Image (cartoon, rainbow, N blue to C red):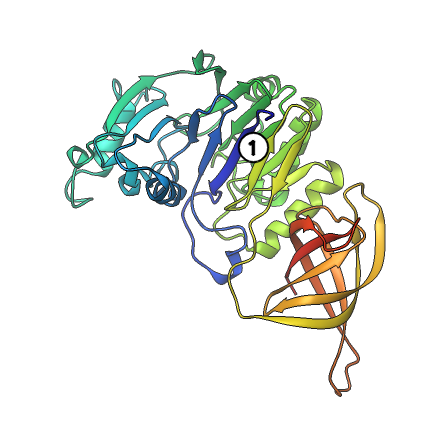
Amino acid sequence: MAKVAKLSFWGVRGSTPTVDRAMLRYGGNTPCLELITPDGGRLILDCGTGLRILGNRLAAAAEADKAIEAQILVTHYHWDHIQGVPFFAPLYPPQNKFHFYSFRSEFLGRDSLKRVFEAQMAHPYFPVDLHAMSAARKFTDVAGGDCFSIGDNQVSTCWLNHPQGCLAYRIETSVGTIVYATDNEPGNLEYDRNLQRFAEGADIFVNDAQYTPEQLEHHRGWGHSSWREGVRIAEAASVRNLVLFHHDPDSSDKTIDGILRDARAEFENTWAAAEGMVMTLGEDRTDVVIPAARNSLRREAHFRARVMGFTEEGRAFQEDTVIRDLSLHGALIYLDHSPKLQSELHVMLENPGDGDAKRLALRGYVVRIEPGPEKDQVGVGIVFTE
């Protein structure tokens, strides 16, 4: 079986977690990614609130008395990147083992990472302290420019332009390279040049895109970037896939849809990070799976519809089909054309009733592609956005 690297997104929101119906599709948890490397190792990137969800999944899947082990790379110490630690269930059983990496802060000095964890669980901020965590823990200081090995993989670091410091991580595996560069502000030529070199040739480049280009001009000094800066680096560094990350807590799904649309107009292989999204990197391709829509009231249906959109190759298409499965916010349809994930579709639904409106115009967003019941057909899962 061909070896792959599997990158899963458990938290993609920046600054603070958010729970809002208008933001459910991309998710409200703060940064946490999981990388399963081709040699079977597990790397965790950042410890935001998405870490709690990952921890619960790991604990539920673990065999009795079998250790859960991971290497955890922390970019920096702002709350949104560490606040999931007290709620990471695998840190409590004694058989588990974790190795943490981050930099020595000029504000904290020696054992910075350990001290950060102790401080956020100290009284009166948390009911139990760090001693309640029985798992084996090791802490290693790294700095920008360092290189080290984790299993068969090479990890290197780079300083980013962010208040109080932040590290980017480049992970080179046997099937390709992932660069994780959240929380970076453009405008400093030295940092900008270093990040471009650091991202050179990456198969997956996860980059901060908290602000629109217009918002960025009003948030200088806050340490974040925009989709346009990510596109600029991706093009200059010959990146294969750009992932927009660290979404603003006030950006609705509709806002992020617009950001993605603008970015794809300039760099086609752009994705907007979403909770539950999985990118599988093989030797010759990268597969992307977008999470299915949230559960809702579903009904079998048989409505005729006309669908308009763009294929994976960027060609416009128009096709008549039948909606087979309908929910209050989405649908499953079968098409001869294969639209790109996270692309927009326009659906004209024929009204099956006797009302005056003969057609219902809907705009949707592709969240799933699967084999269809007929040869050369694909099943397309859509979330309706308006």
Q: Residue at x 76, y 88 (%)?
A: 354
Question: In the visual, does 154 lie left or right of 64?
Answer: right
Q: Where does residue 26 sit, x and y in percent of width and height?
A: 53, 50
Q: Return the x and y of residue 338 as percentages of the image width and height.
A: 76, 48
**Please, is residue 373 above or below residue 215 in the view?**
below
Quadrant in the picture for the C terminus: bottom right
* Three-letter residue code for mark 1: Val
Number of other residues with Cα within 10 Å of mark 1, as a class: few under 14, some 14 to 19, many 20 or more: many
Q: Residue at x 26, y 25 (%)?
A: 137
- The relative height of residue 69 versus residue 194 in the rendered view (above or below) is below
Question: Looking at the rendering, which quadrant does residue 381 occupy?
Answer: bottom right
The answer to whether one can see residue 212 in this image is: yes
Up the image or down, 150 lies above or below 263; here it is above
Given residues 84 and 161, the one toward you in this image is: 84
Dot 1 lies on which element? strand
Residue drawn at x 43%, y 31% as measured from the top left: 45
Coordinates of residue 211 in the picture (x, y in percent): 56, 43
- Report the residue marked by disc 1: 206
Residue 240 drawn at (x, y percent): 68, 28
In the picture, measured across the screen, residue 238 lies left or right of residue 137, that is right
Corner quadrant of residue 281 = top right
Query: 53 or 215, which lies in front?
Result: 53
Is 70 situated above or below 338? above
